[in-house]
């Protein structure tokens, strides 16, 4: 199984180091280089790969510096051709990428961007999803459509409940403040609210969460739940319409 190290950077980003039993080490979405190189050096790990979920600067900003320092292989989406700095290997949804003997199923999950991908390491129950899912949230729909984003979320929420979600930002507390305005009677959400309040009060991270926890409490996973549709005044409407309404409310929250 992968050994995963979480590195907080900038204001609220997470970069991940993932070490395979073979000794291969991947950096997932390096916003910056220095803390990553320092952490790997402290552990005696040699970085062999960078895995990029999408092209935004706070996910690829450290690519070239890390590559110059380590000679690693940079992996990114074919759909982001020309937008991932230093990319060596382009992959697409449906591919299985072999990282040091650990296999990652690649999901094409457009919505936040047009070329967004996610990496699911089934044997390690680990999903690196960039900005597609956040705990109790999802990314803004910037380059795609609400229909694309909803389809992406539906495919990811079908993963096993125990799958840990290694998303790229610590947004959970603010996401919950919004979520309770659209899903106020959700007991799972209220439990998560109490848990997150306690974690943040003690300076602890709220990530990773799990697919099972998000199914129960994340309103963006629940756009096809009749009670959520009713709560936002859209009873009987198509789930994608409910999703679009909830996402627009979050944009303006």
Image (spheres, rainbow, N blue to C red):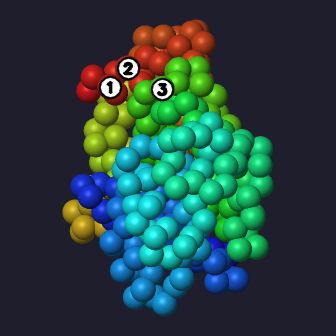
| Quadrant, the C terminus | top left
Q: Is residue 242 above or below residue 217?
A: above
Residue 72 percent coordinates (x, y): 57, 70
**Residue 234 makes an appearance in the image:** yes
For the point 36% across and 50% down, the residue is 58
Q: Which mark is residue 143?
A: 3
Are discs 1 and 3 less than 8 Å apart at CB? no
Check whether the beta carbons of the residues at disc 1 and disc 2 lie within 8 A of each other. yes
Q: Is residue 208 above or below residue 169?
A: below
Q: Report crowding for label 2: few under 14, some 14 to 19, many 20 or more residues within 10 A (C-alpha).
A: some
Tell me which corner region of the image, top left, top right, bottom left or bottom right, holds residue 125.
Answer: bottom right
What distance separates the C-alpha of mark 1 from that of mark 2?
5 Å
Residue on which the image places disc 2: 248
Foreground pick, 231 / 220: 220
* Residue in view at x 25 percent, y 67 percent: 203
The residue closer to the viewer here, 125 or 39, is 39
- Residue 194 location in percent, x, y? 33, 53
| Residue bearing mark 1 | 251
Label 3 packing within 10 angstroms: few (<14), some (14-19), many (20+): some
- Asked if the residue at tag 2 contacts the one at tag 3, i.e. Cβ–Cβ closer than 8 Å, the answer is no
Task: Give the left or right position of residue 169, taking residue 229 as reference.
Answer: left
Element assignment for label 3: loop
Q: Secondary structure at mark 2?
A: helix
- Indicate which label's residue lies in the foreground, 3 or 2: 3
Placement of the N terminus among the 4 image quadrants: bottom right
């Amino acid at each position: 199984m992968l050994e995963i190290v979480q590195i907080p950077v900038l204001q609220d980003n997470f970069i991940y180091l993932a070490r395979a039993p073979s000794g291969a080490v991947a950096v997932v979405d390096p916003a910056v280089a220095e803390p990553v190189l320092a952490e790997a050096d402290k552990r005696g790990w040699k970085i062999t790969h960078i895995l990029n979920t999408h092209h935004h600067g706070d996910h690829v900003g450290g690519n070239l510096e890390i590559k110059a320092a380590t000679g690693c292989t940079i992996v990114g989406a074919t759909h982001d051709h020309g937008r991932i700095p230093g990319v060596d290997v382009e992959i697409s949804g449906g591919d299985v990428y072999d990282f040091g003997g650990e296999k990652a199923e690649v999901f094409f999950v457009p919505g936040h961007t047009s070329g967004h991908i996610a990496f699911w390491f089934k044997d390690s129950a680990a999903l690196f999803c960039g900005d597609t899912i956040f705990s109790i949230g999802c990314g803004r729909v910037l380059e795609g459509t609400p229909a694309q984003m909803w389809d992406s979320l539906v495919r990811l929420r079908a993963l096993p409940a125990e799958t840990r979600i290694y998303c790229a930002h610590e947004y959970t507390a603010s996401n919950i403040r919004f979520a309770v305005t659209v899903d106020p009677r959700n007991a799972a959400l209220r439990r998560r609210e109490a848990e997150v309040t306690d974690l943040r009060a003690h300076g602890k991270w709220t990530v990773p969460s799990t697919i099972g926890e998000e199914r129960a409490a994340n309103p963006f996973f629940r756009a096809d739940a009749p009670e959520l549709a009713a709560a936002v005044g859209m009873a009987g409407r198509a789930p994608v319409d409910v999703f679009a309404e909830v996402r627009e409310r979050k944009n303006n929250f």
